[in-house]
C-alpha cells in the first residue's frame, strides 16, 4: 500500500471525526485530518533535526525540527506519536511521548488544514532514521537550531508548531 492509499480519519474544525478517506484524496480535496509532531531530544538535550526526502507527498526536501506524521483512521494521537517517532528514528522502546498542545494548522490552500498534536520525547537510543523519510539528520543544540531558522527552508507546519512551543515556554 502506498502512502497515498493510507486511510485517515477526516475531522471537522472542532477535531470531531466526520468520515474517512485515503490520504491522497484527503490532500487533493483539502480535507481536515490529524497529524502528530514530536520534538525529540537526545541525552544531552540536543534537538533532532532532519531534511525530508524529495519523495515526500507534502513539503519534500524541506527541513523539520519534529518527527511525526498523519494519524491513521481509528488511531489515537498518543499511539500515532509513539509509532511515528519510532518509525522515523528507526528505534523501538522509546518512552511514550509527552503531549504538549494541539492546534489547527492551515496550509493556506497548499494541502488543506490539519489538527496538529505536539509532543516531546527523550531518545537515548542510537537512531537509524528511515531512509524513505529522512535524507539527512543531526542532533543540534537549541542555539544552533535557532541560528538555522533563517538559513534553511523549513516545513511551514513544523515552523508554526516550533513558534507556538517557543511562545508557550517563554518566561
Image (cartoon, rainbow, N blue to C red):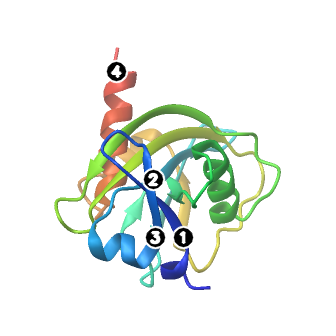
Write down the residue under mark 3: 21
Q: Nearer the viewer, residue 147 or 49?
A: 49
Mark 1 is surrounded, within 10 Å at the Cα level, by few (under 14), some (14 to 19) or many (20 or more) other residues, namely: some
Mark 3 is surrounded, within 10 Å at the Cα level, by few (under 14), some (14 to 19) or many (20 or more) other residues, namely: some
Establish if 92 lies above or below 53. Answer: above
Give the quarter of the image for residue 166.
Answer: top left
Q: Tell me if label 3 and label 1 are in contact, CB under 8 Å.
A: yes
- Secondary structure beneath label 3: strand
User: Considering only order in the chain, which callout, 2 or 1, is on the residue closer to the N terminus?
Assistant: 1
Gap in Å between the C-alphas at discs 2 and 3? 12 Å
Mark 2 is surrounded, within 10 Å at the Cα level, by few (under 14), some (14 to 19) or many (20 or more) other residues, namely: many
- Secondary structure beneath label 4: loop
Q: Tell me if label 2 and label 3 are in contact, CB under 8 Å.
A: no
Position of residue 26 measured from the top left corner of the image (x, y, whole percent): 37, 70
What mark, if any, has residue 170 been given in the picture?
4
Establish if 163 lies above or below 139. Answer: above
What mark, if any, has residue 34 been given in the picture?
2
Amino acid at each position: 500500500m502506498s502512502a497515498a492509499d493510507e486511510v485517515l480519519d477526516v475531522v471537522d474544525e472542532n477535531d470531531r471525526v466526520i468520515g474517512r478517506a485515503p490520504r491522497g484524496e484527503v490532500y487533493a480535496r483539502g480535507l481536515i485530518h490529524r497529524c502528530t509532531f514530536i520534538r525529540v531530544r537526545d541525552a544531552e538535550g540536543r534537538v533532532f533535526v532532519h531534511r525530508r526526502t524529495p519523495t515526500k507527498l507534502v513539503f519534500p526536501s524541506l527541513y523539520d525540527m519534529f518527527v511525526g506524521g498523519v494519524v491513521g483512521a481509528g488511531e489515537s494521537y498518543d499511539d500515532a506519536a509513539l509509532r511515528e517517532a519510532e518509525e522515523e528514528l528507526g528505534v523501538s522502546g522509546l518512552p511514550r511521548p509527552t503531549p504538549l498542545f494541539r492546534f489547527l494548522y492551515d496550509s493556506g490552500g497548499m494541502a488543506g488544514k490539519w489538527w496538529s498534536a505536539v509532543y516531546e520525547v527523550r531518545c537515548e537510543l542510537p537512531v537509524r532514521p528511515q531512509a524513505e523519510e529522512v535524507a539527512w539528520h543531526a542532533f543540534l543544540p537549541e542555539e544552533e537550531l535557532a541560528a538555522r531558522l533563517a538559513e534553511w527552508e523549513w516545513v511551514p507546519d513544523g515552523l508554526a508548531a516550533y513558534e507556538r512551543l517557543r511562545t508557550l515556554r517563554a518566561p
